[in-house]
Image (spheres, rainbow, N blue to C red):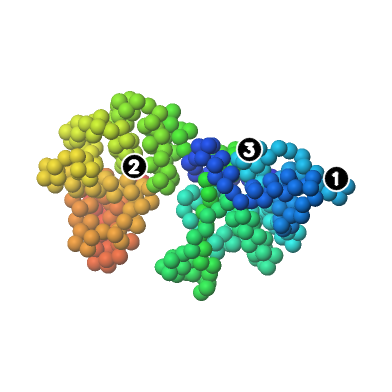
Amino acid sequence: MRETWEQDASAEVTPTMPPVLLKPEAELRLAAERTPLLDDVRGYVAGLDENMEPRDALTPRWAEASGLVRVVKGKHVPLTSLDDPLRLWERLFSAIGEAGPPAAGQLLPRAVASISLTLYQSGQAQVPVELLFEAVELGQAPDESTRYATTVALDLLDRLGAIEQVTADPAGLAMIAEIAGKPDPFPFLVSLTPLAVWAINRELREAGMDAPVIGEASGESLGELSLRLIDSAPEIIDAELKAWVRHRSPSDAAAEASEFLRAARLPEERLFALIALGETGEIGLETVVSVRAEGGLVGAAAAMWLSERGAVDRETITRDEVVLGMADHFAAMHALGAFVHQLADMDDGFDVVDLLTSSRHPDRLELLNVVGANHPDRDLAKKARTASFKLRSSGAQTRHA
């Protein structure tokens, strides 16, 4: 696979890799030791001197492809020690594209690389197997040989313990069928194991690609880190901010986060600052209380954050704080791509249009446009479009205009 990564690294447009969370090596080594395939390979290599027959043809092929044995006078001869289970697992993973049956041919390495990269870029999300077949077929004519190579690749990844597989529930299966355009798709969802994430990250870095690891940016300022987080998944944002706080004393983290919160221009920046302050403990709560007392947009955002955590009496939160604070939260969610999905989960009696219109939030027009185009309640969607028209007629503009 390393050759594939190097080709990607030298391309004019390189794939974007999300930050990943790497488990401690001790934990990974234990997981590798528990992989059944390692026992098979070790047993095969150890039994070469005793002329023991392997249980299947896969084990000798994988051992040879991994450089664990070589052919001398038509027979395998051991080449290297197999003591460290993690390094052995890594060697087996790197050679997975050459370990398959001859019938898989030259398509197998590319299938393994395509599947691995698709799953790696998906983060912790489980990916339908049907979409993995499409990822492998992308850019080439789909045929039986390609599907066979993809099936073999998935089987080898599973044998090595590089992927986890679950069966979709009926609702998930219906969604897969709709996405794939097939009435009877494969019902399985796949994700990488921590071992595979670790191995792929190492290979990407060795190939010269930018493959960030969660916590690497913890020494940066919160402003610099925030720029990295805009396009990240919620679990990545949470993990990165936790790592950023752990890199400092609680008091230093709270001081920097509060300064960033007060100076923030964007709603997502205020959200990141508040999340960081929440990770600092009691000093963070005290800091947010003081920020709330300063009033304005940042004070309203602080008030709603405190209310959600039960850190203040809800009866002390003013209507202005509720309206402006909720609008700011919606704006942050919109910047992160989540607001449109929140619309379907809002209570039937909640009038988001009235809230946004009365909030005077800088992003209210942009949010009204989203509500008008996407709210499942047609009456509210129409009301949002009308409110948006009135605001634009009065000279209001979106922040991104």
Type of the residue with mark 3? Asp
* x 27%, y 66%: residue: 377
Q: Earlier in the sequence, mark 2 or mark 1?
A: 1
Q: Is residue 159 left or right of residue 393?
A: right
Mark identifier at residue 268: 2
* 249 over 135 or under it: above or below: above
Give the structural element (helix, strand or loop) at label 1: strand
Residue 85's x, y, as percent?
62, 41
Q: Which quarter of the picture shows residue 83? A: top right
Give the structural element (helix, strand or loop) at label 2: helix
Q: Earlier in the sequence, mark 3 or mark 2?
A: 3
Q: Is residue 293 left or right of residue 400?
A: left
Residue nearest the observer in this picture, 110 or 297 = 110
Answer whether labels 2 and 1 touch (C-beta < 8 Å).
Answer: no
Mark identifier at residue 84: 3
Residue 258's x, y, as percent?
28, 30
Q: Which residue is mark 1?
A: 72
* x 85%, y 45%: residue: 72
Residue nearest the observer in this picture, 319 or 93 = 93
Residue nearest the observer in this picture, 391 or 350 = 350
Q: Which quarter of the picture shows residue 29? A: top right
Q: Which quarter of the picture shows residue 54? A: bottom right
* x 41%, y 68%: residue: 171
In space, the residues marked 1 and 3 are separated at their CA atoms by: 25 Å
